[in-house]
Amino acid sequence: MPVLDPNPQNGQKKLLLVFGAFFAIFIVIGVVATILAP
């Protein structure tokens, strides 16, 4: 399975979505940690 498909069907979009979700969770955790920090 190639990492970069010349003709992405749905894998690339799904990967981007998962990456975005991970990034969003990371940002939320960072904000919560900053708010809860004394």
Image (cartoon, rainbow, N blue to C red):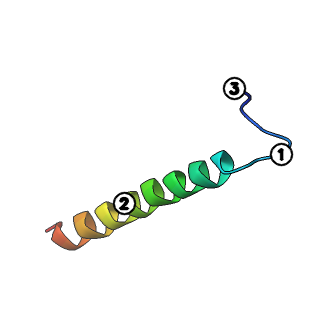
Q: Is residue 22 above or below residue 30?
A: above
Q: Earlier in the sequence, mark 3 or mark 1?
A: 3
Using the rendered view, name the quadrant where residue 4 is placed.
top right
Question: What residue is rendered at 33% in x and 62% in y?
Answer: 30
Q: How far apart are the alpha carbons under marks 2 and 3?
A: 28 Å
Q: Residue furthest top?
A: 1
Q: How many marks?
A: 3
Q: Report x, y in % for residue 15.
A: 58, 48
Residue identifier under label 2? 25
Residue 29 rendering spot, x and y as whole percentages: 29, 61
Label 3 CA crowd tier, 10 Å (few <14, some 14–19, many 20+)? few
In primary-sequence order, the first of circles 2 and 3 is 3
Amino acid bearing label 1: Asn
Q: Helix, strand or loop at disc 2?
A: helix
User: Is residue 21 or residue 2 the one in the foreground?
Assistant: 2
> Under tag 1, what secondary structure?
loop
The quarter of the rendered structure image containing the C terminus is bottom left
Q: Nearer the observer, disc 1 or disc 2? A: 1
Q: Which residue is mark 1?
A: 7
Q: Nearer the viewer, residue 13 or 29?
A: 13
Query: Nearer the observer, disc 2 or disc 3?
Result: 3
Identity of the residue furthest to the right in this view: 6
Q: What residue is shown at x 74% (from left), y 28% (from top)?
A: 2
**Disc ID at residue 31:** none
Which residue of the protein is positioned furthest toward the bottom in this rendering? 35
Quadrant position of the N terminus in the picture:
top right
Q: Residue 11 at x, y = what percent? A: 64, 45
Image position, residue 7 (x, y; %): 83, 45
Q: Is residue 26 above or below residue 12?
A: below
Q: In the displayed image of the protein, which residue is found farthest to the front?
A: 9
What mark, if any, has residue 1 been given in the picture?
3
Amino acid tagged 3: Met
